[in-house]
Image (cartoon, rainbow, N blue to C red):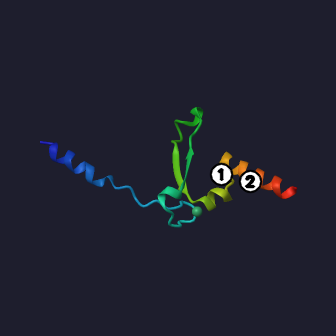
């Protein structure tokens, strides 16, 4: 019977602790940026989609972090009120 092999399958499903792939810093999984590199169709036979997780500092260093519109709007308002 092969049912025993199946039962074992679920045990190895633990996902490793997430850390920044660039600086190896321990970062809470909820504070990691998810970077996905998806190859164009022409290269999809040679490359597969890669997924990496990195901390906000590294995302900023790579110019990959973009502030939310909400935050930008608040900053714009702050600048304006300072000018007056
Ligand atoms: Zn990092």
- Indicate whether 49 appears above or below 80: above
User: Which residue is depicted at the point 22% across and 51% down?
Assistant: 8
**What secondary structure is marked by label 1?**
loop
Q: Residue 67, position in %: x, y?
A: 67, 51
Q: Residue 20, position in %: x, y?
A: 53, 61
Q: From this viewpoint, which residue is outermost toward the right?
A: 84
Q: Nearer the viewer, residue 46 or 57?
A: 57
Which residue lies under the disc numbered 1?
A: 64
Q: Residue 13, position in %: x, y?
A: 32, 52
Q: Nearer the viewer, residue 69 or 8?
A: 69
Label 2: how many Cα within 10 Å (few below 14, some 14–19, many 20+) = few
User: Which residue is depicted at the point 82% across and 55% down?
Assistant: 81
Q: Nearer the viewer, residue 45 or 41?
A: 41
Q: Quadrant of ligand 1?
A: bottom right
Q: Residue 54, position in %: x, y?
A: 56, 57
- Using the numbered discs, state the Cα–Cα distance from disc 1 to disc 2 in whole angstroms: 19 Å
Label 1: how many Cα within 10 Å (few below 14, some 14–19, many 20+) = few
Mark 1 or mark 2: whose residue is earlier in sequence: 1
Which residue lies under the disc numbered 2?
A: 75
**What secondary structure is marked by label 2?**
helix
- Indicate whether 3 appears above or below 33: above
């Amino acid at each position: 019977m092969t049912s025993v092999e199946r039962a074992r399958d679920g045990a190895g499903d633990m996902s490793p602790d997430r850390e920044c792939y660039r600086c190896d810093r321990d970062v809470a999984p909820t504070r990691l940026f998810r970077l996905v590199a998806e190859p164009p169709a022409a290269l999809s036979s040679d490359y597969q989609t890669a997924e990496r997780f990195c901390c906000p500092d590294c995302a900023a260093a790579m110019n990959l972090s973009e502030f939310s519109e909400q935050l930008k709007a608040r900053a714009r308002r702050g600048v304006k009120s300072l000018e007056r």
